[in-house]
Amino acid sequence: MIIENLTVRFGSFTAVENLTLEIPPGSVVGLVGESGSGKSTVAKAICGLVRYEGRMSGVDPKRVQLVFQDPYASLNPRMTVGASVEEGLSALPRGRRKDEVERLLSLVSLPPEFAGRYPRELSGGQRQRVAIARALGARPELLVADEITSALDVSVQGAVLNLIRGLQAELGLSMLFISHNLAVVRYVSDVVAVMHRGRLVEIGPAERVVGAPEHAYTRELLAAVPRLRH
Amino acid sequence: MRQLLRTPTGVIGLALVAATVILAIVGPPIWGEAAETIDAGAALQGASAEHLLGTDNLGRDILARVLAATRFSLLLAVLATVIGVGLGLLLGVLPSVLPRRAARLVTGAVNALVAFPALLLAMFTAVVSGLGARGAVLGIGMAIAPGFARLTQTLAASVAGADYVAAARLLGVPRWKIATRHVLPNIAEPVILNVTAVLGTGLVAMAGMSFLGLGVQPPEYDWGRLLNEGFGRIYLDPVVALGPAAAIILAGLGFNMVGEALAKSAARTSASAGPVSAAEVAPDDSAPDADAVLEVKDLTVTFPGGVTPVRGISLTLAPGEIVGLVGESGSGKSLSAFAIGGLVPYPGTVTSGRLRLNGTELTELGQAKRRKLLGTSMAMVFQDPMASLNPALTVGGQLAEVATVHQGAKRSAAWARAVDRLKHVRIPDPEKRARQHPHEFSGGMRQRAVIAIGLMGSPKLIIADEPTTALDVTVQRQILKLLREVSADTGAAALFISHDIAVVSELCHRVVVMYAGRIVEELPVSELAGGAAHPYTKALVASLPDLDTDKGEPLAAIPGTQPAPAEAGTGCAFAARCALADQRCGERPPLKEFGKAHTVACWHAGTVEIEVATR
Ligand SMILES: Nc1ncnc2c1ncn2[C@@H]1O[C@H](COP(=O)(O)OP(=O)(O)OP(=O)(O)O)[C@@H](O)[C@H]1O
Ligand code: SF4
Ligand SMILES: [Mg+2]
């Protein structure tokens, strides 16, 4: 997908300004930046959920899926987990949907019994895994992942990141991976883009951005990454 | 229903509604004949022992007519409501289903209709469709529809903006399915509540139409018609008009009151505190720790059906100490914090052998005292600061409220303290910011404001549940620094809940690891990176990616899943995922001392030392 001159305004406030970004087929582009820098707005624009100016080309808009940041808002409280995941499976014959739901749940390491549960019975992390399963079910061409691991435990985060990389290699999935955690972004992405106040301030190969940051803000982000004390 | 009976409004409303419905059922068979009996000799009488409310121009008993008219009056109101609500729902949901332009057209039409006086609309419709009961019902229905459509639209719009509707749209779910599956079920509750109130309004409006002569025509009669007939004589015999008028007002009021009480109780259930009991666990006999800020023993949280997400955890916090509580999502971290704060949602129950805050056993206090103590000596900070802030009030006002409510401070003093606390949490320009609303704050500033609310009292304990998860790293760093400073300045102890073990290692003195509702390891933070003894803790440390992690290798991850609270068996809950598991792990390992200030619950944690009683 190629994004050119993307600008998003909410009233008089400009959330994203003149952003140009390419997500080459089969690659993962990481997007980092502080809260309110416009990362989630970029995600919503790509998915056509907000009005924007600029051009997007290269991917069928119908084959873009988004995994949301807030696991408490992204599942319908009145629908079972199974019914939510099944929403993306309309292409499959009815008889096969149940098995597919089970397969998707096990992909995100949830037991099959969870299909009958309601979101309120799940913890935040468990809900997020359901949302990922739902998006994967639609076999997207471009997956936009907006802070999908920030609500997950590290023990599961590893599995989800491994899973996402595996799926990407297997299906040639392109991905925009948004996170505030530079260590995570570096691990999954080929290219890292840094956003600050609605603008792109730095973009380059992941190792280069992390190893030799050029912009002062990138250096600030790097210094703030929490590390295990040794 | 039980909630409804708790308020006087609810009780009175329910009684009135019940009386109306009973009269509607039994009225016509009992008084129907008397109401139709013509007695020319007794025409136009005032109140008497024989005719309590007098008689009409044909000598019929007005009391009997009022009672018998209940059924017809209620029926007409119900019909009008059905028409109005049905039409309103349709118009209200359409915009979230139609394409953008058509949606705007419907919204515009509804807005225009809402602006049009309802009574005129009702009269116009009634006259156009012919005088009589049918026309009036249609007219009232038409008058109800725009307001109800507006209500539905507002509710539907807030649901339509939710992430799960966006997700469904991205998945290509058809519009009508989005309406029936996502929008309607999630607005059903407030809509039903409103129907009750609308019914009351419809009843009064219907009577109004008949009173004006636009509704029920003789020989049929409803309350409005009776009022109309009696009205001419109001100066001579006020009682003949008062009977029907009272019936209209009481019935209308009844439905409105029930509607209001329902709406209030619905708003309350979502915020009610859970019951607290100490019945099942024997109080601990050992001497309480006099210095501890918080001392918890055998804290258990149970939900009906044998679901026990928190199973007998014990925890002690010294003044100024910051303890990190880490663990997989669903391990019971938040519920433990809720239990300490008395916030476990209904129908959960909390039991504890000991729950002492600053030397006071909380379970021995009454609800009000307990809430007051928690309100002044404990501060809670949650992941979503908006959940703790009222969007309609200024930030300063919310802070000041704590001081006026809990500490009985004067308003000006409370405001000054609020500004001072905002300054304390490093909010720039606190005087100006205090007058702003939460939505004018950034995420990090909102979290600071929530911490400031906690600092309005003199907290001895701060419980922070994932306070920085929603924030980016730079802001996260500032908030952590603030928490550390606050704890150092005030000597408050802090329980810091997080699934991010790296953050915990930077902030805390001590780390408590939870798994499947139990504490499995407790260790000084310096031991975390190299000295963790429980296989789960070790895996947690290993699975953390950092800036030098080899991208060619898969990340370390723990296979399998944590058992659900209902399924944690009798053995070690980690066994299914543990590489070291053997036969012995079929029995649950107790929490044992492992080193200095270090306890572990694992059979294979290393050399076994003195056993510490855990129960
Ligand atoms: N109201 C409830 N009814 C039934 N089970 C519940 C309820 N609330 C929570 N649970 C269950 O209790 C367990 C612990 O939940 P809790 O919210 O304490 O987890 P947590 O450790 O805070 O997780 P997270 O890191 O995801 O916030 C979970 O398995 C959850 O499904
Ligand atoms: S007790 Fe056994 S199963 Fe449990 S963590 Fe220790 S070795 Fe693993
Ligand atoms: Mg939690």
Image (spheres, coloured by chain):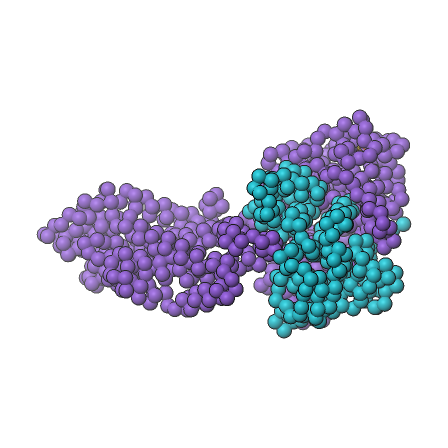
Question: Where is residue B364, by image quadrant?
Answer: top right
Question: Where is residue A183, by image quadrant?
Answer: bottom right
Q: Which quadrant does ligand 2 occupy?
A: top right
Residue B353 placement (x, y as % from top left): 70, 36
In front: B503, or B365? B503
Residue A186 appears anywhere in the view: yes
Chain with purple colouring: B
Residue B250 appears anywhere in the view: no
Residue B529 placement (x, y as % from top left): 87, 46
Residue B225 placement (x, y as % from top left): 24, 57
Question: Where is residue A159, by image quadrant?
Answer: top right
Q: Residue at x 67, y 38 (%)?
A: A111
Residue B584 placement (x, y as % from top left): 80, 26
In front: B166, or B83? B166
The hue of chain A in the figure is cyan
Judge from the rendering whether residue B161 lies leftward or rightward of residue B122; answer left or right: right
The residue sitting at the bottom extreme is: A12
Relative to B508, say whether B109 is above or below: below
Q: Residue at x 44, y 56 (%)?
A: B89
Judge from the rendering whether residue A43 lies leftward or rightward of residue B55; answer left or right: right
Q: Residue at x 80, y 39 (%)?
A: B536
In the picture, the quarter occupied by the C terminus of chain B is top right
Q: Residue at x 24, y 58 (%)?
A: B132
How many labels sit on residues?
A: 0
